[in-house]
Image (cartoon, helix red, strand yellow):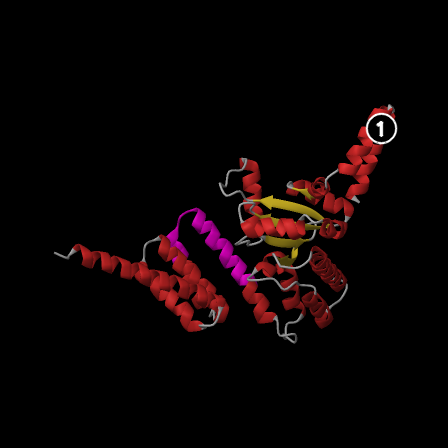
Amino acid sequence: MLATKLMVDLFALIPFLMKPFHLFLFSLVLSTMSLSALEKAAWTTDYNAAVKVAREQNKSILLLFTGDWISMCRVFDETIMNQDAFLQEASEQFVLVRLNFPESNRLPEEIATQYQLLRDAYRVQGFPAVVLTEADGKPYGLNGFQPVTPELYAEQIIAMHGNGMEMKAKREAAESLEGIEKAKLLTEGIPELPGNMAARYYGEEMRKVIEADPDDVLGRKGEFAGLIDDVKYSKAMQLLSKEGKWDRMIELTDAYIEEKQLSGGMLQKALLNKSRVQERMDLLRGRVESLLQVVEVDGDSGYAQEAQRQLDELRVEKLRIEAEAAKSQEP
């Protein structure tokens, strides 16, 4: 499609290129047009413009969070994301948005603010990362680099788009239903997303499931209620962090753990949050205690692995300090 548009634009110049030499040059331009020009035309860096186009053309949005200073990001671009085999398929269903975070972090203020807001909104921790959303910003799929062909990657993305649109149709169809049938269809229409991301974007649907299934026939009431509470807690913590109210953040976390009787991953996540605040306040003993509690809850979880990593770093630092102290006391 992009190639066709560019060809049409160039053919519009033919009346001005009637001389034989000019016709020769025109043919040369067509024959030597690099594929990279077509590839670049498929991507935009303007998120707001992408949203407008997605709404007008009834498309989804593919957000590529990347850094051209990272080797894996460059490989991702070269082998998949800038390959015509991927672009032709993906651009049929998506408006493609490239968000490049330079190593220097030097971007125009307006762009830097927009990129950071998007990164925070979709909880992007590392690059490259791919987030698939509806035109209104609701995410339904996450992906990243995979050592596959551009054709296969396009198939994966298109399949995720199909699933996303199917879930959207279920949520819309559920509005005309009542009771358990409504709850069931709504539940099937909520994407599986990490952490509390699903509740951030589909919290209203989760509330409707709880309301339509008061007896918890589907067994999702506790899970959804917990995720909704976690979103409220996270937003409150973010606000307190901006205000630098570290003591209040610890109090809020302790109260959240106690009032909601957190367990499992939810408890580990809250304790990790607490440990980060304690690190900020230089409360080493409290931080170590929080990290140890994370490991005790479930030593095999990802949260526990992160806590153990931090504990190991603290042990190494303690040994280094002790060694330097001992060395300084040598005669």
Residue 92 at x, y percent in the picture: 77, 50
> Does 111 sit left or right of 179 as displayed?
left
Residue 31 at x, y percent in the picture: 79, 38
Residue 48 at x, y percent in the picture: 66, 41
Q: Residue at x 44, y 51 (%)?
A: 240
The residue stretch that appears in magenta: 228-250
Q: Image height check: is 155 above or below 12?
A: below
Quick one: 297 or 320, which is closer to the camera? 320
Residue behind mark 1: 23
Quadrant where the N terminus is found in the figure: top right
Q: Residue at x 55, y 54 (%)?
A: 123
Q: How crowded is mark 1: few (under 14 residues within 10 Å), some or many (20 or more)?
A: some
Q: Residue at x 53, y 62 (%)?
A: 229
Q: Which residue type carries mark 1?
A: Leu
Asked whether the viewer can see residue 251, the reply is no
Quick one: 183 or 294, which is closer to the camera? 294
Identify the element where label 1 is drawn: helix
